[in-house]
Amino acid sequence: MAGEHVILLDEQDQPAGMLEKYAAHTLDTPLHLAFSCWLFNQQGQLLVTRRSLGKKAWPGVWTNSVCGHPQQGETFEQAVTRRCRFELGVEIADIAPVHPAFRYRAVAPNGIVENEVCPVYAARVVSEVQPNDDEVMDYQWVDLATMLSALAATPWAFSPWMVLEAENRDARQALTDFVARLRG
């Protein structure tokens, strides 16, 4: 999205300024605020996406459903909803935190660094997926347990943030509980 910014953070995770999103993601990316969301359908299947080849960081890599950066004055719920509409063309409901304190730093093969305080959410998709080709080149609905096994067995096949999110025991349990509620 044109004109998007990231909220820079100090080492105490407090806002310390803003920077244009593409200018922020470099070989020396400053710590900034982000979010990650795992989307599920009513049957409890996880939407995994393959990042567009045009993405600056981790192009072509399979990842969780959607990620992004909240804008100044925007709640995480508003930011998640906005990015779901933009990247996937979907409406969502039942947004729930699953790993609110997630923070990571990862270096892509091309040298671009992600350095984020990145709360993780789950949500339910309530419309058909219509991906934005500039963001997503492919997607699949998969069973959560199958995906968690794949992440543990072949972490190199997925984005580092998805792998790290799934390694957190409390996040895995929260995702499993979210799916159980969907299935009733």
Image: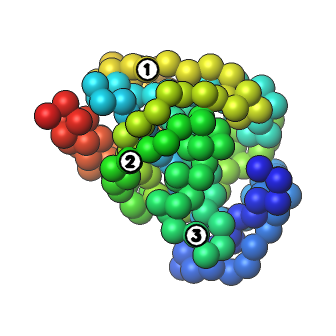
Label 3 Cα crowd, 10 Å radius (few <14 / some 14-19 / many 20+): few
Q: Quadrant of residue 52 in the image?
A: top right
Q: Mark 2 points at which residue?
A: 93
> Does residue 180 lie above or below 71 as drawn?
above
Count of marks overlaid on the render: 3
Give, as a three-letter code, the residue at label 1.
Answer: Trp
Q: Which residue is drawn at 64% across and 39% down?
A: 87
> Does residue 163 lie above or below 121 as drawn?
above
**Callout in the foreground (1, 2):** 2
Give, as a three-letter code, the residue at label 2.
Answer: Ala
Q: Report if residue 128 is visible in the image.
A: yes
Q: What element carries label 1?
A: strand
Q: Mark 1 points at which residue?
A: 141
Q: Report if residue 164 is visible in the image.
A: no
The answer to whether residue 38 is left or right of residue 81 is left
State the separation of the CA atoms marked 3 and 2: 17 Å
Give, as a three-letter code, the residue at label 3.
Answer: Glu
Choose the circle earlier in sequence order: 3 or 1: 3
Q: Residue at x 46, y 33 (%)?
A: 127
Numbered tag placed on residue 74 in the rendering: 3
Q: Residue at x 62, y 19 (%)?
A: 138
Choose the circle earlier in sequence order: 1 or 2: 2
> Does residue 60 lie above or below 95 as drawn?
above
Q: Quadrant of residue 143 in the image?
A: top left
**Callout in the foreground (3, 2):** 2
Numbered tag placed on residue 111 in the rendering: none
Label 1 Cα crowd, 10 Å radius (few <14 / some 14-19 / many 20+): some
Q: Please state which of residues 128 and 133 is positioned toward the viewer in this rendering.
A: 128
Where residue 153 appears, x then y in whole percent? Answer: 41, 20
Q: Please state which of residues 151 and 124 is positioned toward the viewer in this rendering.
A: 124
Q: Do the residues labelled 3 and 2 touch (CB within 8 Å)?
A: no
Choose the circle earlier in sequence order: 3 or 2: 3
